[in-house]
Image (tube, coloured by chain):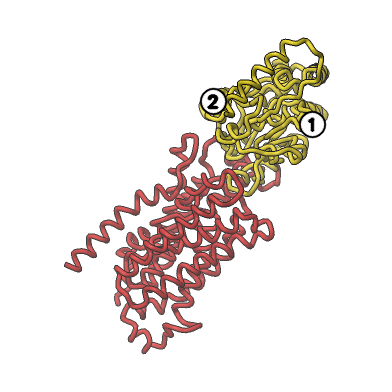
Chain colours: A yellow, B red
């Protein structure tokens, strides 16, 4: 019975699509399965268009747009939820919620899978992919153009002798080449300490090595809620002594966890810190 | 009772060991530092890289190794004397485990932000709870009862520690269980030294003050009582030992995690050298524990590839064979 109805509806919809009548189509309902696509969706979607984003989008440690995320429904990114909500468009990321994405494909939803942004130059393309999929092309073009313009005005070349910067996070992990934060450093005119020191073997760096061979700027990433031994590492007094004043910068990781227009704020903060270094020199 | 001829010599040798290993631990590390320059900078208050490495990274670590190792060795010697059981050790009896549970409950829930004192108090509460349960449960029971109660207590404390670490908000917490169950001195600060110090001093003095009572107890409870030592009640030997152990072990475990087997091995190794009189063993046991932990910490730093090994892994590798050897001796005595 319901199948018949659906077939009939499909036929009617097909006829309507063939008739060239300029009538306002309802915007597609969208479900997002990843915190990065969540935020692109929040930037681009029209009112009522969002059927669900992940609960992580409301976590201000991980998401820049956590405030906006409070006004839209959240959905745990499971296959069951995708099937139950049968959205028109499903947004996901290459490495997450694979089963939910498969379920969405089988239910006939339009699936957009974005790879994680690895460079600032990837971001306008990702904005446009989401914008085109959810029928917000004009808004997407404006955002992407703004992004490209602001990036061009902020970007500067580190050159071979530019100051070095290390991004130091919980447990003593440093960020290496081939990531979005690494590209942010390059655009801010800083050379990545991990690349300069050629520490490709281990992503962890002990404080003793960091103090003995210091970078010009220490970027501390204090992300994550709660207290733990891992998170207390960036607060060690040895680092406070060795990287006093303008030689360290606290930068919230949510800015560059996802490729967003807000990621450019991190470029601006790092450029300001770089200028601060030059004043000291 | 014949006094051991080498008692003073033993203490001097052990003290020299502590001093020598401390210097080595300050001078030697992952990076090469010109030690004399670093020391000069440190004394002059200059923030050079060498001064920061020696003063802020290596010095707290060395001091903590001395305090934590000494406390574990001393409390092992005191517990073995008091319980008249050569297998007693704060780790095996679950006192360290209880302290770790208390410290974890304070550290990860953010109570520590209220006051820095909350951390040692949490460790103390956990250690005291475990010690009280142990003394209450065992009473006059034999070695088997004591070890069974200890095994049950440490398993329970480890399970509860894992539960707390899984429930707290930090995404890193559940990966840090190894620190609390095995112990490590990586990246400790001077704050941790100050947290640890009062408990170690007060607890250590309480334990040392019980030395003569332990000698009397070695001759039996009746003899001890007839010599004028009170065994039960508020001002008794029992209170002093339980409180002293809990204070010292609680504040140490709160900063280093539970490091096992030090309290078992050290008194066992030193007893033949110090003479079989419990009070003579106490100071050597403290110094010996410091030597053992300083050495273990140097090895941990030497073999580090990427992540450092937990200290308790090394002490367990050294200590477990001793424990098994004692069990075999115990078995022969029974059969």
Residue, x 46% and y 67% (percent of image)?
B130
Based on the displayed image, in which of its 4 quarters is residue A138 positioned?
A: top right
Earlier along the polypeptide chain: callout 1 or callout 2? 1
Residue A221: image x %, image y %? 67, 37
- For the residue pair A242 and B41, the one nearer the viewer reads as A242
Q: Give the residue at mark 1.
A: A47
Q: Chain of mark 2?
A: A
Q: Secondary structure at mark 2?
A: helix
Quadrant holding the N terminus of chain B: bottom left
- For the residue pair A65 and B67, the one nearer the viewer reads as A65
Quadrant holding the C terminus of chain B: bottom left
Based on the displayed image, in which of its 4 quarters is residue B117 positioned?
A: bottom right
Q: Residues within 10 Å of mark 1 (few under 14, many from 20)?
A: few
Residue, x 59% and y 41% (percent of image)?
B36
Q: Residues within 10 Å of mark 2 (few under 14, many from 20)?
A: few
- With A134 as the anchor, is A176 left or right in this view? left
Q: Chain of mark 1?
A: A
Residue, x 45% and y 42% (percent of image)?
B309
Q: Are marks 1 and 2 in contact (CB under 8 Å)?
A: no
- For the residue pair A132 and A66, the one nearer the viewer reads as A132
- With B197 as the anchor, is A252 left or right in this view? right
The answer to whether dots 1 and 2 both sit on one chain is yes
- With A173 as the anchor, is B8 left or right in this view? left
Based on the displayed image, in which of its 4 quarters is residue B302 positioned?
A: top left
| Real-space Cα separation, disc 1 to disc 2, in angstroms | 27 Å
Residue B247: image x %, image y %? 53, 67
Q: Give the residue at mark 2.
A: A102
Residue B239: image x %, image y %? 48, 77
Q: Secondary structure at mark 1?
A: loop
């Amino acid at each position: 019975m319901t199948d018949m109805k659906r077939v009939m509806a499909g036929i009617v919809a097909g006829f309507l699509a063939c008739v060239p009548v300029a009538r306002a189509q309802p915007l597609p309902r969208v479900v997002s399965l990843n915190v990065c696509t969540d935020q692109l969706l929040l930037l681009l979607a029209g009112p009522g268009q969002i059927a669900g984003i992940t609960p992580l989008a409301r976590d201000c440690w991980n998401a820049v747009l956590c405030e906006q995320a409070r006004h839209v429904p959240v959905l745990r990114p499971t296959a069951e939820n995708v099937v139950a909500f049968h959205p028109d468009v499903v947004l996901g990321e290459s490495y997450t919620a694979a089963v939910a994405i498969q379920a969405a494909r089988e239910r006939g939803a339009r699936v957009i899978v974005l790879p994680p942004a690895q460079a600032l130059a990837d971001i306008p393309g990702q904005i446009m992919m989401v914008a085109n999929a959810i029928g917000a092309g004009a808004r997407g073009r404006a955002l992407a153009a703004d992004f490209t313009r602001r990036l061009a005005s902020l970007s500067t070349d580190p050159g071979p002798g530019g100051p070095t910067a290390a991004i130091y996070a919980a447990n003593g992990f440093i960020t290496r080449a081939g990531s979005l934060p690494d590209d942010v450093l390059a655009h801010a005119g800083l050379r990545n300490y991990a690349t300069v020191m050629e520490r490709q073997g281990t992503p962890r760096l002990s404080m003793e090595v960091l103090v003995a061979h210091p970078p010009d700027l220490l970027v501390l990433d204090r992300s994550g809620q709660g207290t733990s031994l891992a998170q207390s590492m960036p607060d060690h007094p040895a680092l406070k002594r060795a990287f006093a004043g303008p030689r360290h910068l606290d930068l919230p990781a949510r800015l560059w966890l996802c490729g967003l227009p807000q990621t450019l704020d991190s470029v601006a903060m790092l450029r300001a810190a770089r200028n601060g270094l030059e004043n000291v020199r | 009772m014949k006094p051991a001829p080498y008692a003073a010599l033993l203490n001097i040798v052990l003290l020299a060991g502590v001093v020598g290993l401390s210097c080595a631990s300050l001078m030697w590390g992952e990076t090469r530092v010109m030690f004399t320059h670093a020391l000069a900078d440190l004394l002059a208050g200059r923030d050079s890289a060498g001064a920061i490495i020696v003063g802020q990274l290596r010095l707290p670590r060395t001091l903590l190794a001395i305090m934590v190792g000494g406390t574990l060795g001393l409390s092992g010697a005191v517990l073995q004397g008091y319980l008249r059981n050569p297998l007693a050790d704060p780790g095996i009896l679950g006192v360290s485990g209880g302290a770790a549970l208390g410290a974890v409950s304070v550290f990860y829930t953010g109570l520590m932000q209220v006051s820095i004192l909350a951390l040692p108090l949490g460790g103390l509460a956990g250690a005291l709870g475990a010690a009280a349960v142990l003394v209450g449960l065992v009473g006059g029971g034999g070695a088997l009862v004591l070890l069974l109660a200890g095994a049950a207590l440490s398993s329970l404390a480890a399970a509860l520690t894992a539960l707390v670490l899984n429930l707290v908000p930090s995404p890193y917490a559940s990966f840090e269980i190894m620190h609390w169950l095995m112990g490590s001195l990586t990246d400790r600060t001077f704050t941790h030294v100050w947290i640890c110090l009062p408990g170690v001093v007060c607890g250590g003095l309480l334990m040392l003050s019980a030395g003569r009572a332990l000698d009397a107890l070695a001759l039996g409870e009746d003899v001890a009582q007839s010599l004028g030592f009170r065994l039960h009640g508020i001002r008794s030997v029992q209170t002093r030992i339980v409180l002293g152990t809990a204070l010292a072990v609680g504040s140490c475990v709160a900063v280093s995690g539970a490091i096992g087997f030090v309290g078992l091995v050290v008194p066992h190794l030193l007893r033949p050298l110090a003479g079989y009189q419990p009070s003579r063993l106490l100071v050597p046991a403290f110094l010996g524990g410091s030597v053992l932990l300083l050495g273990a910490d140097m090895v941990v730093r030497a073999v580090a590839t990427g992540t450092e090994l937990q200290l308790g892994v090394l002490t367990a590798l050294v200590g477990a064979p001793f424990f098994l050897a004692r069990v075999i001796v115990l078995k022969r005595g029974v059969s």
